Amino acid sequence: MKKKEEIPWKIHLIIGILIFLVLSLLILNYFFFFKKTITTCGDGTLYEECSFRKPYFCSDGILLKKASICGCPEILTINKVNEDECVSKYEGESKQINLKYVLRGEEYIMNILVYKKLYDYVSKLSRSIDYSAGEEPSLLDFKLMKIDEIQQRQLLLPFVTKIQNIASNKEDQARIAISIIQNIPFGSSNKTFKFGNSEMEYSRYPYEVLYDMEGICGEKTELLIFLLRELGYGTAFIHYQSENHEAVGIKCPIKYGVDNTEYCFVETTGPSIITDDETEYSEFGKLSSVPEIVEVSNGISLGNKIYEYKDAEKLMSIREAMQKYGRINMFQYYRFNKLKEKYGLEDFSDSYVF
């Protein structure tokens, strides 16, 4: 019987190499195609598509104004000079403001235009709500009245888009928005408004906070809620009635939330770390009352492993040591300075009572 001829080993090798090359090309082609189909801009819009937020168009990872392709919102009109721009009737007397934020220890400045014509418009809007007989006034009604103002929203959205163009990562978008609002100086308005026969303290709309570059806790909280909601996050107001203080709640895992809720504490009056609700305030000390959580939007959540959770714990442990012993050791001092740099925190003597 004739012995079957064996295929030389070199042919085996050549066939193996060819199979490897073909498979490699198929894999590379798959990943290239996959990447092209899922690549998005900071708001989730796919490349070469219009955003749900007119007139923006996603091009190579950047949201650009393309009204000629995507159209304009109903209350805006196409610019006669530049058909890719949408214009508001309240875009008059512009000025540039410089917004500071700190991200992982690096300080940045964002420049945006604000308009006196819109500022004057919102400053004249009513601060009161008429209720029908039997209806109960609610905190949320008054907050939404200011946050949802339609003309204001259109001229705040470019601010949101700038954040989305800076960072594609959703958690970094939240970090930037939070840091910007925390770094807007704290300050109250000297205005008042009439309510019936009474004169009451004036409360700014979010656009006024931005234009004035100052605000108190409730005013800055409303502006940050607007930004985080537009970025897609679940949000809430955290209202401490006894202390007359407000903070932002951003959706997060329950184990990190305020009072076992799904909202993490975010201070707006100055630079602070997400979940750090142990700050001492000069007016009333620490927050000690049970807050009212007023949900605004049901959106995405912060992740389970963001670095702020552990950093806030480190800061609180340093603060506890200072309170207990009146001093901290060199290791704790070094750790605090690293946190101070990372978040733009102020010194103990400026921010905390020990």
Image (spheres, rainbow, N blue to C red):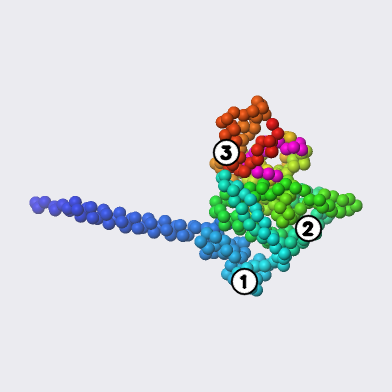
**Residue placed farthest to the top in the image?**
325
Residue for point 29% across, 55% down: 19
Q: How crowded is mark 2: few (under 14 residues within 10 Å), some or many (20 or more)?
A: some
In the foreground, 123 or 169? 123
In the foreground, 287 or 297? 287
**Of the numbered discs in the image, which one, if any, rests on residue 99?**
none
Q: Distance between the residues labelled 1 and 2?
A: 30 Å
> Would you say 18 lies left or right of 165 here?
left
> Would you say 128 lies left or right of 51 here?
right
Residues shaded magenta: 269-284
Secondary structure beneath label 2: helix
Which label's residue is closer to the chain start, 2 or 3? 2
Q: Residues within 10 Å of mark 3 (few under 14, many from 20)?
A: some
Q: Where residue 273 sits: x, y (%)?
A: 63, 41
Residue type of the residue flagged with mark 1? Asn
Vertical relation: 243 (above or below) 175: above
Q: Where residue 84 sits: x, y (%)?
A: 60, 69
Residue type of the residue flagged with mark 2? Ser
Vertical relation: 230 (above or below) 353: below
Q: Do the residues labelled 1 and 2 touch (CB within 8 Å)?
A: no
Q: Which is closer to the viewer, label 1 or label 3?
A: 3
**Of the numbered discs in the image, which one, if any, rests on residue 123?**
2
**Of the numbered discs in the image, which one, if any, rests on residue 338?**
3
Which label's residue is closer to the chain start, 1 or 3? 1
Question: Can the viewer see residue 183 in this picture?
Answer: yes
